[in-house]
Amino acid sequence: MTAVATILEVENLSRRFGGYFAVAEMNISVKRNSIHAVIGPNGAGKTTLFNLITGVLPPTEGRILVGGTDVAGARPDRIARLGVVRTFQGVRLFPSMTALENVLVGRFCRTSGGYLAALARIPGRPSATESGARRRAKELLDRVGLAARANMLASELALADQRRLEIARALAADPQLLLLDEPVAGMNPVEVHEAGELFKTLRDEGTTILLTEHHMSLVMAISDCVTVMNYGRKIAEGSPEEVKRNPEVLTAYLGSEVMT
Ligand SMILES: Nc1ncnc2c1ncn2[C@@H]1O[C@H](COP(=O)(O)OP(=O)(O)OP(=O)(O)O)[C@@H](O)[C@H]1O
Ligand SMILES: [Mg+2]
């Protein structure tokens, strides 16, 4: 049964805006414990695909199976409770909360009732739960290299740190499948390398990662599988080596990106 080996199956998925198909008849199968990249030129439909998978947008057609359950058209919180959590291409943090508080919020976005309801549901000692949550949030900040900035406001962080914070917040929800939409955009080469190492470690610890990126050398270095989109459609798929050699991929990228 495919549900065992794959965490996500996207079947014949389409999304139309007016007369334009941003995603058209897409099929993707994401293996558990893999890093799976979706690449393609600007406007190829990558973010729209992520919006469909995470319930931000309903599909026009198609199925989205998470661990075998069809979630096409389901609300984002239901999909998050199944362990599918994302970051956004345009960072979406709570700007006037500290880094630590942003991560604490992430812990409870999986529960529909929110932070206080989650505490209220736990009998006994909510304060112990809260301090446990804070400890865990600090650990996550440490993992992404933000331990020293825990008490800074999110709005005071540099863009690269805001992206890291988004990842820590997503990790706070204990994702099984983590979707990262251009997670290293705006990072310098050292930061990109560190992010790549973090993604590999997360995968090795059991978090499956689906990411979009324009940073080709990172994609080619860390991905187990690469799906290439153009004009909403899948035009190629395979290992980094296979995709790099694919003539259709080279044509799609001609004049926009360099496949290195
Ligand atoms: N809400 C919307 N309404 C209308 N058109 C949209 C909407 N969202 C996306 N589109 C269109 O769908 C197409 C795909 O956009 P999408 O953002 O998914 O591309 P992308 O591959 O993520 O691009 P980039 O690499 O620039 O982030 C684009 O032509 C875009 O203008
Ligand atoms: Mg995008």
Image (tube, grey):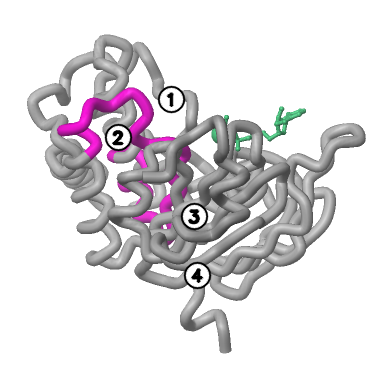
Kind of element beneath mark 3: strand
- Name which of mark 3 and mark 1 comes first in the sequence: 3
Amino acid tagged 1: Val
Which residue is at 73% across, 64% downward? Answer: 63
Tell which tag, 2 or 3, sits nearer the viewer.
3
Is 152 displayed left or right of 218 in the figure?
A: left
Kind of element beneath mark 4: strand
| Coordinates of residue 41 in the picture (x, y in percent) | 58, 37
In the rendered image of this protein, does residue 24 appear above or below residue 94? below
Is 21 displayed left or right of 225 in the figure?
A: right
Tell which tag, 2 or 4, sits nearer the viewer.
4
Q: Are marks 1 and 4 in contact (CB under 8 Å)?
A: no
Give the label on residue 84, or none.
3
- Between residue 50 and residue 252, name the one nearer to us: 252
Residue 179, magenta (yes or no): yes
Amino acid tagged 2: Val
| Coordinates of residue 180 in the picture (x, y in percent) | 43, 43
Density class for disc 1 (Cα within 10 Å; few <14, some 14-19, many ≥20) is some
Q: Are marks 3 and 4 in contact (CB under 8 Å)?
A: no
Q: Does the residue labelled 3 lie within 8 Å of ligand 2?
A: no
Kind of element beneath mark 2: helix
